[in-house]
Amino acid sequence: MANVKRSPWILHYDGSSCNGCDIEVLASMTPVYDAERLGVENTGDPMQADIFLITGGINSQNASVVKQLYDQMPRPKVVVAVGICACTGGVFKDAYNILGGADTVIPVDIYVPGCAARPQSIIDGIIRARDLFQKRSEEHDALMKKKNLERRQA
Amino acid sequence: MGKKSVIPFGPQHPVLPEPIHLDLVVEDEVVEEAIPNIGFIHRGLEGLAEKKDFNEMVYVAERTCGICSFGHGMGYCEAVEKLMNVEVPERAKYLRTIWMEFSRMHSHLLWLGLTADAFGFESLFYECWRIREWVLDIMEKTTGGRIIFSVNQVGGVHRDLDEDQIRFMKGELDRIERDLKNCEKTLFEDATVQKRTRGIGVLSKQQIHDLGAVGPFARASGLKYDMRMTGYEAYGNLDFEPVISDEGDCYARILVRTKEIYQSIRLIRQALDQMPAGELSVPVKGMPKGEAMVRVEQPRGEAVYYVNGENTRFLNRFRIRTPTFANLPGLCQMLQGANYADVGILVVSIDPCISCTER
């Protein structure tokens, strides 16, 4: 914990899940499981979010919404697919309106399995996402520093 | 006269974790018209009935909605049992009733929390969800799952309760009742709650009847309409009256749902005391043939299940009419003439379950 420098904010979107994973995401934020002790916070604004938690599969109508939310988030960003539907399509894989898991439209970094995913595994996913976010931020900072240096020299 | 403008609400909105899109035509902070647009979570679940065996379909039916998951599984099983003339053992009926009432408690506590969150009362939100976790603990210890626990099967249930579990349930019910009493003071008397909910979104009994609303939303306006009174499963042997209120505003909806949690606690206690010993399930022979329809009271209101089979392993047609679908016209009626700041609480007040509605 001592090496945590950043406090990433979470954006949660319900793709086409059955609500099961959504209420577990919310439950993992409430005091009993308290994911907020890790320095994360749930936000409703994609422009301020760093970690994108997506539950449920992708269908033809929400594909553009998911893509838009992902594009609105500033770089660096991490995507966590929560629940088996977001990973592969799950029990609804054969349904006519499901295109597949979240990775059909956006790149997914961390997969959290389960139907519904338990708060413990969601918190584990958030911890991994936080570590990945920190690594990406450092890379991003180094890149920006290098670019600024080049600009100044030019 | 101000200029009219259209403000989109959703599909991604902080007040509700589920995607519903409303186009709000607003003039000077007052909503003139609300145009709902749904379909963001449509999965085509009913179509899966043609691809999955009718016994396997129970698991898909339970995933219609994660909050009232048990009720959907039960409704589907009841419909298929009616089609195949299967009589479920008495003990299974009581077990279904007990788990159904626990589902109702967890759903209503979840809703109370989300309502508190909708008007910015964060500590009340956390308090309600803390009590809800105890209900989930009971579910986990007796069925193995927290929110989706597949204990239903066509012809009965999978799991039984032993003496220890019944004693544990009774102890936890006392604890939940005591803590809810504490929470109730804030829910019913706090000035913040009253300011945000009293006289907001009033619908009269006649309006509710004409719009075809169901569940606690209808009962809050004085319509005595509860499917449990038809006496399916073990409800016929239990003693209860539907909770109603005459005010028809958001405050009445909080009141009705809170009282229904106490009602569920009483029903579970009665059912635990009366539960007879016996078999858990009966073997099901043959294939479904013909059509059947059942009505079940979900936490959000009346749900209708229709199944149609042609003597094969696969059902020909499976259809669910979910309670939120019936309540959406009521929501659009409430939103007309409402303040823009109240839209969040009004949307939450019907207890929308978009996953059910779009299936």
Image (tube, helix red, strand yellow):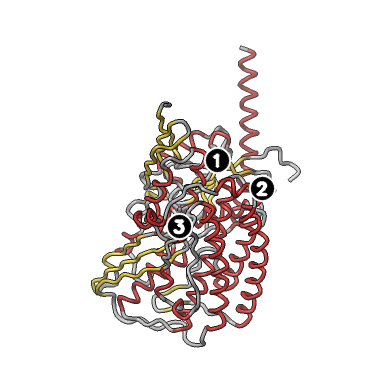
**Residue A59 marker:** none
The residue nearer to you, when weighing A84 against B351, is: B351
Residue position marked by numbered label 2 in the rendering: A36
Query: Whole-percent x and y of residue B22?
Result: 41, 41
> For this view, does B336 lie left or right of residue B197?
left
First reached walking from the N terminus: tag 1 or tag 2? 2
Query: Whole-percent x and y of residue B96?
Result: 48, 75
When the figure is inspected, residue A138 is found, relative to residue A92, above or below; the finding is: above
> For this view, does B221 lie left or right of residue A80?
left
The residue nearer to you, when weighing B246 against B342, is: B246
Q: In the rendered structure, which amino acid carries the disc numbered 1?
A: Gly
The residue nearer to you, when weighing A103 against B89, is: B89
Mark 3 and mark 1 on one chain: no
Residue position marked by numbered label 3 in the rendering: B221
Secondary structure of the residue carrying tag 2 is helix
| Quadrant assignment for the N terminus of chain B | top left
Q: Residue at x 40, y 81 (%)?
A: B88
